[in-house]
Amino acid sequence: MLIPPPRADITSLIAAARALGRTVLSEPESKAFLHALGIPVPAGCVVQTAADAAKIAEAVGFPVVVKAVSHVLTHKTDAGGIVFPIETASAAVAACHLIAERVRRTRPDIVLDGFLVEAFQPSNLEWILSLRMDPHYGPVVMFGLGGIFVELLGHVSFRLAPLNGNDIDGMLAENLVARALSCIRGNGPADREGLKAAIGALSDLGARNDIAAAISEIEINPLTVTERGVLALDALIHLRP
Amino acid sequence: MQDITPLIAPRSIAVIGASSSPTKSGGVLFANLANGGFKGSLYPINRGATEIMGHKAYPLLADVPEQIDLVYIVLPQAYVEEAIKQCVAAKARAACIITAGFSEASEKGRTDEDSLRKVASQSGLLMAGPNTIGMVNVDCGMMGSFVNFPRWEKGGVSFFTQTGIFTGAVMLHIMSAETQRLPVSKSIDVGNKIGVDEIDFLNFIKNDSATKVIGLYIESIRNPRLFLETAREVRKTKPIVLLKPGQTEAGARASTSHTGSLASDDKILDDGLRQYGIARAEDEADFLNALRAIVMLPKPKGKRVGIATTSGALGVISTDLVVRGGLELAKFEPGTIAAMRTILPEWLSPANPFDFWIGIDVKGPREAHEVGLSAIFADPNVDLVLCTLLAPANADFPGFGDLLKQLRKTHNKPVAVTIYGGSARARWVTELEGAEVPVFNTTREAARALSLLVQATY
């Protein structure tokens, strides 16, 4: 992946993972997928060595975040696989060593595919946005308060895809969501249009038969929504087994 | 898509297990059909009788001289399968199995139920039940139940239920009400639901001119996606209220993703109902209240509520309930405020909720109610009216019912009324009969009914 990632074709991304016998796209693969859909992702790149991490960090511009890359490691935070904010090239090198050591300790079963170095995006509030091919309800879009405590918070809502404009507005009008979107701690109002476009992009995807047959779930968590727009900070795509 | 007309609106009915005995289910069901004014032909099937209640009896279904639309089966559990075989052999179009003791009762019952399904599977026989109180269609005079219903208020509500005796008890409750009786068109209880389901029912009822509002009590939805999509289509012309228990069941899906853990069937259903404008009731009272409000009231033009009250406390309580129910408080026009001022002392400013109790002291009960209620009904910013009134002797006046009746008619806006206490209450409620003004026991129920009305129709 380059900075910013090139527009890949989503069907070839799915085919590539399938060819490797995988049903999970790694974070950088998932982000390339989202980028192809027009959902913004942070500028960044996957590297194999700590030295390359430092170079990419300088190219992207500080601060950056460094993350473990593995299609097996679906909950990176639990394994200590994320370090941020990183302000210097030497800190980027140290972060790679630290992550490698932590993953070795907590998940000895995993061989890392590399490190993802990305522009660090501070955010006050984290959202979750997903498309799920539900066994009973078919394609559904979920949106709400995200982060690692998303299940505890339980502030999410579902809509059956495809969603029309009213459906999306209804989702954003839900009590706490509406308040959280309007203004947060001195920030300007969130980019609602950008958010609606991202929800619409997943909804459109859910209505496609080829996608419904290939994918079981796309989960963006966290997604930030600020006055500067939306940004998918992490994402995971599950293919159908 | 199967046409279930022969089940719901049959031209001919046979009852296997009909008898003259008033203590047996088969006897009561046949008597209800015979006395209910059914418009088609009616045949008792009984091996030991030649005639039952003036109707010629036949030993077997095959002996009946015409092809039958609907066969009620009211037999002991062990004989049901043989009766279904008779239905298939005689090419009956539909069967309603009243008998209980199947999947709801035991493992053996479950196996027996599967073989009923198997027997009917190739024949196209439409099936309701087993374990049902039966089916009522007021429009064609079919009182096909072993519950003896005293009186039906013919009207626009049609029920589809999936339960045994609950439906009967609820129907009896509806019918025994002295005032505010719910007008019913059809009540179809499919019990264990081995054949005809909610989607078949919705497709039928969509084109049923007698049905204005639909009430569904469903325990399990066979095809949730198709159900919601069908309901969305039907809802364009007929509002739907769903009562489906099981909201507290834990999401049973093991999942590696947050989304998967959060995607319980009930959560998606709940949100999908909201998306498609189907009202979801929380309990049996909520269900019936919503149906009563929807069948009596016009579609609201928005969700701004004007609150008329003669109690400051009930006004504030109403405000909380309205806002929590997803509705908004209307902002009154200057003309409305000016009209309201005429019944208040100078030092008091009218607002929403409008409490005009003091107007009763100033202008007397008639003028206070006339001006107070008229101002709110007439305000163009008011889409719905919530009236929560007190009825002690000093607030009473002759013609309360006529006043509300006339306002309801003139402005054609949805209104929900609660009347508390006092000697006049019973008379006020009686005066509102026939006025298409729903009255509720509590402010909570009234506000909730308006909220579900908006969900189902706006």
Image (tube, coloured by chain):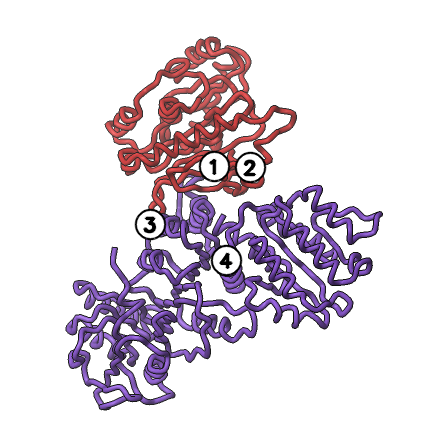
Chain colours: A red, B purple
The location of residue B304, given as percent across then percent down, is 60, 46
Q: Disc 3 to disc 1, how far (Cα)?
A: 23 Å
Q: Earlier in the sequence, mark 2 or mark 1?
A: 1
**Number of the label disc, if any, that sits on residue A143:** 1
| In front of the other: B321 or B82 | B321
CB contact under 8 Å: marks 2 and 1: yes
- Relative to residue B266, is residue A25 drawn left or right? left
Q: Disc 1 to disc 4, how far (Cα)?
A: 31 Å
Is disc 4 in the same subunit as disc 3? yes
In the picture of the structure, the residue carrying the numbered disc 2 is: A177
Q: Disc 2 to disc 3, how far (Cα)?
A: 29 Å
| In front of the other: B214 or A67 | B214
The location of residue A208, given as percent across then percent down, is 30, 34
Is disc 3 in the same subunit as disc 1? no
Position of the N terminus of chain A, as image quadrant, is top left
**Number of the label disc, if any, that sits on residue B226:** 3
Q: Secondary structure at mark 1?
A: strand
